Image (cartoon, rainbow, N blue to C red):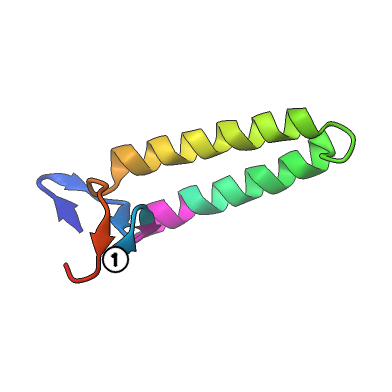
Amino acid sequence: MDDGHRKIWFSAKRYGWGWTPNCWQGWLVLAAFVALLAAGARWLRPHAHPAGFIAYAVALSILLTLVCWLKGEKPRWRWGGH
């Protein structure tokens, strides 16, 4: 997809608010998020240090949302259709 002249990595969801990957770059970002979250769970040991892991997961989630915001379609609530 192309939003004006920029390549869109994340399409807006059909229902609700949010994005889904629609090209290899978007899928790579999502895979990196999952891999980093799994690595953090192994490295930070959530059972031993829950606050540290929660802070790490929140930081990763904010970073993912920022990338989706910058490289995705304009977010808004959708009820289906176009």
Is residue 23 or residue 57 the one in the foreground?
Answer: 57
Q: Is residue 22 magenta?
A: yes
Q: Position of residue 47 (x, y in %)?
A: 87, 40
Q: In the image, which residues are magenta?
A: 20-28
Q: Is residue 20 left or right of residue 6?
A: right
- Most extreme residue toward the right is 48
Residue at the (57%, 31%) spot, across then down: 59
Residue identified by numbered label 1: 14
Q: Is residue 46 left or right of residue 64?
A: right
Q: Quadrant of the N terminus?
A: bottom left
Q: Is residue 26 magenta?
A: yes
Residue at the (29%, 57%) spot, across then down: 11
| SS label for mark 1 | loop
- Most extreme residue toward the left is 4
Quadrant of the rendered image containing residue 65: top left
Quadrant of the rendered image containing residue 55: top right
